[in-house]
Image (tube, rainbow, N blue to C red):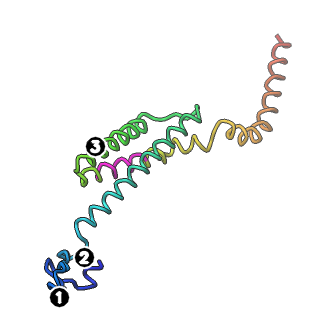
């Protein structure tokens, strides 16, 4: 940090800033050994917490929009439970942060983001998103019709011959 680079003395007036004409002496905060003060760590923690919560909310909203826009998407019970738990953890994290318990709030926000991302990137949901029934028909009908049509015509001919022989 800047204090460490300037080699400011801990918790005392800076040299040369003595009582000059009634001016206040310049004081410096005690630097920690790692160069990061607790208020700096708190500031970064709050920013990370906001980012985690914002990303969790965006991910859950996008997931809900995806499920609403594709009516054929089947969401497994496990995925629904993950989404529900992510939403509950996000609420709990916001409540903990407002109470001042930032480490617990940060842990809850991180877990909520993990669950939300896991739910939105689940293979079953992603596969349904990319492989709708229209896509499946477009892929499999050109392959299946040339095979299926002669088989059906041959089957109908055999049925009519069997009927005529009776």
User: Which label's residue is closer to the chain start, 1 or 2?
Assistant: 1
Q: Is residue 111 magenta?
A: yes
Give how far across and how far down residue 106 sits, in percent: 29, 53
Secondary structure category for the residue under label 1: loop
Task: Left or right? Give the position of 130 relative to 116.
Answer: right
Q: Residue at x 34, y 54 (%)?
A: 49
Residue at 23 percent of width and 85 percent of height: 7
Q: Magenta stretch: give its range.
A: 107-116
Which residue is most to the top?
Answer: 166
The residue labelled by disc 2 is 35
Work out whether residue 92 or residue 100 is closer to the camera in this orientation and state it.
100
**Secondary structure of residue under mark 2:** loop
Majority secondary structure in the magenta region: helix
Q: Is residue 47 above or below residue 71?
A: below
Question: Which mark, by number, is residue 95?
Answer: 3
Q: Quadrant of residue 18?
A: bottom left
Residue 102 vs residue 120, the one in the foreground = 102
Marks 3 and 2, how far apart at CA: 31 Å
Residue 92 in which image quadrant: top left
Q: Secondary structure at mark 3?
A: helix
Query: N-terminal of the two: label 1 or label 3?
Result: 1
Q: Which residue, given by chain and number where applicable, does mark 1 sit on?
A: 15
Give the position of the N terminus as an image quadrant: bottom left
Residue at image position (40%, 37%) is 78
Instruction: Mark 1 vs mark 2: give the one in front.
Output: 1
Which residue appears farthest toward the front when viewing the image?
A: 21
Specify which label sits upstream in the sequence, 3 or 2.
2
Vertical arrangement, residue 9 with respect to residue 86, above or below: below
Instruction: Count numbered badges in the picture.
Output: 3
Residue furthest out toward the bottom: 16
- Relative side of 26 to 86, left or right: left
């Amino acid at each position: 940090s800047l204090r460490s680079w300037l080699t400011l003395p801990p918790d005392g007036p800076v040299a040369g800033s003595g009582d000059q004409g009634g001016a206040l002496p310049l004081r410096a905060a005690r630097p920690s050994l790692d160069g990061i003060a607790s208020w700096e760590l708190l500031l970064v923690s709050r920013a990370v917490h906001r980012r985690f919560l914002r990303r969790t909310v965006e991910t859950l909203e996008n997931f809900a929009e995806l499920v609403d826009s594709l009516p054929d998407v089947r969401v497994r019970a496990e995925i629904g439970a993950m989404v529900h738990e992510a939403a509950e953890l996000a609420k709990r994290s916001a409540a903990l942060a407002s109470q001042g318990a930032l480490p617990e709030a940060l842990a809850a926000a991180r877990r909520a983001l993990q669950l939300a991302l896991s739910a939105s990137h689940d293979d079953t949901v992603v596969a349904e998103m990319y492989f709708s029934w229209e896509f499946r028909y477009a892929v499999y009908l050109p392959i299946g019709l040339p095979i299926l049509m002669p088989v059906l015509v041959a089957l109908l001919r055999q049925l009519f011959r069997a009927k005529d022989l009776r």
